[in-house]
Amino acid sequence: MNIAALREQISQAHQHERQTGQLEQRLEQQLPHLHPLIQLPEQDARGTLARFVSAYIDQVPELLEAAYAVARQAGIEAQIKPVLQIAEAYFLLPPSELQGHVGLDCLLDEAYLAHRLVEEVNDLYIRHFSQPLIPLDTTVANLIAHQLIGEAFANQLDEVVHHSVDEMLDDQSFAAESVEQYRDTLCSPETGEAWKRWPCLSRQWGVELGQSA
């Protein structure tokens, strides 16, 4: 895992944003067109959205680093490392749909891919093990990011994620003789305790989804 390279890429994107204000400009244009269920404070709505995007992007290396540390401690590194490497590759070697993109607002696309991959894998693990691999619910955050990216392009990115998961994991992946032992490890108190050392994963972003009428 090249977490340092991820952080450096994100740091450069933040520097680009300070120089250009590209993300702030994009959000300013999007504010009047956001889905009405996205709830923002009346004051500093654009700033709140900008902080959300920054936190969403900044969380990716922390999430991957935490997941890798837990996988090593819990003895499930062989199963988890390929998943994390794909998420990492979205940043360091983005798919053709994202090549040439520069800046914090464009890095939102790569962050969405990484978060959605983890979300899809979590769903798969819930189906097979009745609990998530990573106890972090980013569903609302991903829905908000989906809206900010735009329906058409975000749907394309979702297809990239689905293809990656289909190529990487299927029912046969869970049919090995070690599955029961793996299940016990996944549900172990040691795994839960390891996650408690990463409180940053419960970060509050200040953007919520309201209830439909």
Image (cartoon, rainbow, N blue to C red):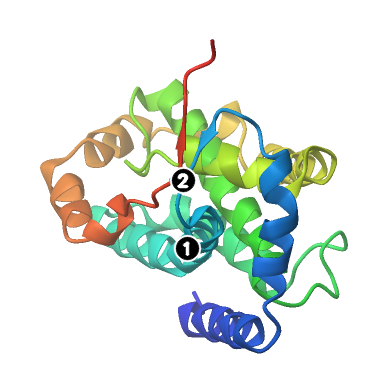
Nearest the camera: 173 or 17? 17
In the rendered image, which quarter is residue 108 located in? bottom right
Point out residue 128 in the picture as x, y percentages from the top left corner.
Answer: 44, 24
- Up the image or down, 151 lies above or below 22; here it is above
Q: Residue at x 81, y 64 (%)?
A: 98
Q: Secondary structure at mark 1?
A: helix
Q: Earlier in the sequence, mark 1 or mark 2?
A: 2
Point out residue 88 in the picture as x, y percentages from the top left corner.
Answer: 58, 67
User: On the picture, is 108 further left or further right than 156?
Assistant: left
Point out residue 155 in the picture as x, y percentages from the top left corner.
Answer: 78, 38
User: On the picture, is 13 further left or further right than 76?
Assistant: right
User: On the picture, is 132 further left or further right than 124?
Assistant: left
Nearest the camera: 8 or 181? 8
Q: Which residue is mark 1?
A: 51
Q: Mark 1, mark 2: which one is toward the viewer? A: 2
- Say which quadrant the C terminus sits in: top right
Q: Secondary structure at mark 2?
A: loop
Nearest the camera: 19 or 142? 19
Q: Which residue is mark 2?
A: 42
Point out residue 57 in the picture as x, y percentages from the top left corner.
Answer: 53, 64
- Up the image or down, 116 lies above or below 78; here it is above
In the rendered image, which quarter is residue 111 located in? bottom right
Name which residue type carries label 1.
Arg
Name which residue type carries label 2.
Glu
